[in-house]
Image: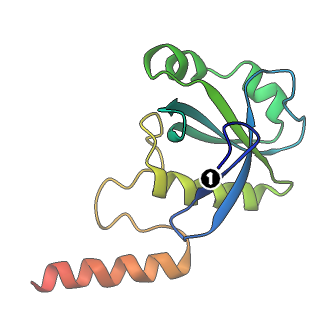
Amino acid sequence: MLLYGFHRWRGETRRKYWFNILLTDRNIPDDGGVYIFVRRRYIFWLEPIYVGKAASLKSRLRKHERWGEAFWTRGATEKHVRIIKHEEARRRTEEDLVRKLRPPLNRQLTPSNPNDAPRNLSLAARWARRAYWRKAR
């Protein structure tokens, strides 16, 4: 991992996603994709604050309603972006990352109980097996 440039985040499916690290709003791409508000601690330790998706990253990130809360109350210092062209792929990537990273400002996709299975079929089957064995004990 570098201080600035790229960072790899891993989703619940164990898939690795490479993100560009942006410190200013000048370099935001106009394409669609997934973004993460990040708080950097102790130089190398990164804490995700919020994960989202957008059809146009530039218009979404410049006037994002959660950036003030992420910046002022949670200490977010940078934005990580990944360009993804297709809406379905953006949705899957966002869901995968939110379920693994559990950012404090994301509430809609964070699992609230063991029966809240993900949409990914292999993960849903794994969650169902875990729920079954918990009930059997």
Q: Please say if 37 is above or below 111.
A: above
Q: How many marks?
A: 1
Label 1 crowd bin: few (<14), some (14–19), many (20+), radius 10 Å = many
Question: Which three-letter amino acid code belongs to the residue tagged 1?
Answer: Glu
Which of the two residues, 97 or 60, is positioned nearer the viewer here? Answer: 97
Residue depicted at 54% across the width and 71% down the height: 13
Q: Position of residue 31 (x, y in %)?
A: 89, 41
Element carrying mark 1:
helix
Look at the image and tell me in which quarter the C terminus lies. Answer: bottom left
Which of the two residues, 58 or 44, is positioned nearer the viewer here? Answer: 44
Quarter residue 85 falls in: bottom right
Q: Please say if 112 is above or below 124.
A: above
Residue depicted at 56% across the width and 73% down the height: 120
Q: Please say if 51 is above or below 58.
A: below
Q: Please say if 27 is above or below 125.
A: above
Q: Position of residue 110 (x, y in %)?
A: 42, 50
Quarter residue 10 falls in: bottom right
Taking the image as shown, residue 129 lies to the left or right of residue 14, namely left
Extreme residue in the right direction: 30
Residue depicted at 54% across the width and 79% down the height: 121
Q: Position of residue 53 (x, y in %)?
A: 69, 43
Q: Position of residue 72 (x, y in %)?
A: 49, 13
Residue depicted at 83% across the width and 58% down the height: 86
What's the colour scheme?
rainbow
The residue under label 1 is: 94
Taking the image as shown, residue 122 lies to the left or right of residue 7, namely left
